[in-house]
Image (cartoon, rainbow, N blue to C red):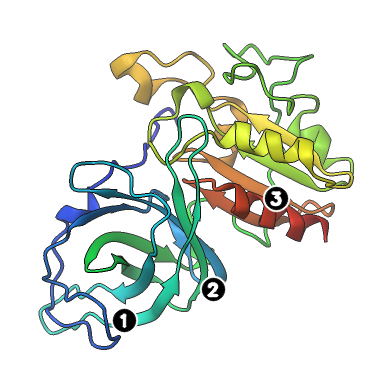
Amino acid sequence: MHRRQLLTGIGAAAGLTVLGTACGSGDGVPAVEAEQSLFVQAASLEFLSGPDRWLAFGIRDLENTPLDDADVQVYLRTIATAPDQTAEVVAGPLAASFAPATETGQGIYYLQTTIEEPGLYDVVATVGDDHGVASIQVVDPSNSRVAVPGEAAISARTATTEDDLGVFAVCTQDPPCGMHEMSLDEALETGRPVAMMFATPEFCQTAVCGPSVSTLDAIRGDGDWGDTIFVHSEIFAEAPVGAEAPTTPLVPAVEAWGLPSEPWFFTIGGDGVIAGRLDGPMPEPILRSMLEGLTA
């Protein structure tokens, strides 16, 4: 794989046309055809069906200004894909928490919920009388494009301070993070838990991907995570340049994991089995929760 499928920008979902004119259920949910007054960005490649799934998203007003720390209520609504179908609310209202922006990132709203069935859904975020919609794809874990919890982690070499593997940069964060002491393949052989971050701080291309590496590195330094090994891998083997970025070669670990976007974060148990995964926005509270689950 030599192409990067970058996350879509704010407002892309707002232009999506959906069929059907009724919500089906759920008081307070704007109708499908109601004009949107907010942009909602759920910038993840895919969401998994099942219990306790994280949903993180950004919100901006029509002037593209981030909407921070608002009272946000969220509904999940099926998308009618045929004229004889009706959009139905399957969850909500769900209160979203807010994680403030750090460094260059955007503040992120997040919540945890159960999504029983795969399919296309609207994430309807309401703030008083205003609302916005982002469409997401929910897939069964067995059909995911990327490794899922319950599967064995893929052993692959990652660049370290001792062996850069010939890539242009071990870490593009300034200053470099402290998560390059051990390669992923070596970490998996230790029998210890592993926190694995795939991200490129310098070349992150969406507002909500934010400073995922620096956030994780700070968490690493201020908590008691037992003998967990923290590993960071850059995405590109060569420095991306302008329009050539989509064809820039990837580092071996990203190739091995088959990652079609970035950033991605995985927690891996001492048995080498993936315990959790997250892509797109990386709010600090979610990363902490995943690490707590790994070290409990």
Q: Nearer the viewer, residue 216 or 182?
A: 216
Dot 1: element: strand
- Nearer to us: label 3 or label 1: 1
Dot 3: element: strand
Which residue is labeled 2 in the image?
A: 50
At label 3, which amino acid type do we have? Thr
Dot 2: element: strand
Which quadrant does the C terminus fall into? bottom right
User: Which numbered disc flags the more N-terminal residue, 1 or 2?
Assistant: 2
Q: Looking at the picture, does residue 262 appear above or below residue 58?
A: above
Which residue is labeled 3 in the image?
A: 267
Is residue 49 visible from the viewing direction of this image? yes
Instruction: Indicate the position of residue 273 as horizontal and vertical percent values.
Output: 74, 55
Describe residue 121's horizontal placement relative to residue 105 as left or right: left
The residue depicted at 63 percent of the width and 29 percent of the height is 233
Instruction: Indicate the position of residue 221 as horizontal and vertical percent values.
Output: 78, 35
